[in-house]
Amino acid sequence: MFEYDGKVKKIVDGDTIDAYIDLGFNVHVDKRIRFMGIDTPESRTRDLTEKRYGLGAKHRLIEILEENDNIFVLKSHGTGKFGRVLGELFHHHESEISINEMLIDEGHAVAYFGGSKQEVKDALMEARKLSKEYVEKHIEPLD
């Protein structure tokens, strides 16, 4: 596992971002990062309820990262099957605070290390209980 400083380029959804990664010695790369160990609702789906919660997860991630001037610490776990960097993001100023864990604790994500789509869907449905108030406050109904 390697640790790098990074800066957000674009937030794709609640568990994926595009970022500039500082490799040291004035070398930077532009990479897509998939948050390791979590899954958030999809924000690009026909299921309008899931989409609303997916947009809520993305909105919350934007807030968290903006609080840190879009700078973070990445603990990289290599690359996944789609070529994305797999990693855990941490607050830049307080590197013991995991952004991945924050999203789980607030109900915007669930822990994910494989499993069936139905198991993940069931876990996300349960997590909605924690994030419902946030989503209703920040994301307009889509129907």
Image (tube, rainbow, N blue to C red):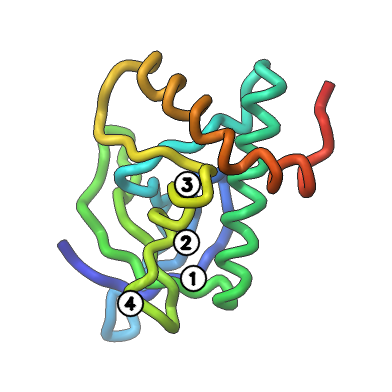
Q: At numbered mark 1, what does the secondary structure look like: helix, strand or loop?
A: strand
Mark nearest the camera among 3 and 4 is 3
What residue would you read off at disc 3?
16
Q: Mark 2 or mark 4: which comes first in sequence? A: 2
What residue would you read off at disc 4?
27
Tell me if mark 4 has few (under 14), some (14-19) or many (20+) residues whose alpha carbon lies within 10 angstroms of its own: few
What residue would you read off at disc 2?
19
Mark nearest the camera among 2 and 4 is 2
Residues at badges 3 and 4 in contact (C-beta under 8 Å)?
Answer: no
Q: Mark 1 or mark 3: which comes first in sequence? A: 1
Disc 3 residue type (three-letter) = Thr
Relative to residue 19, is residue 49 depicted above or below? above
Residue found 39% across the figure and 55% down from its top: 101
Question: Separation of disc 3 and disc 4 at Cα?
Answer: 22 Å
Residue 4 visible in the picture: yes
Mark nearest the camera among 1 and 4 is 1
Residue 27: % across, % down: 33, 77
Q: At numbered mark 4, what does the secondary structure look like: helix, strand or loop?
A: strand
Relative to residue 70, is residue 30 depicted above or below? above
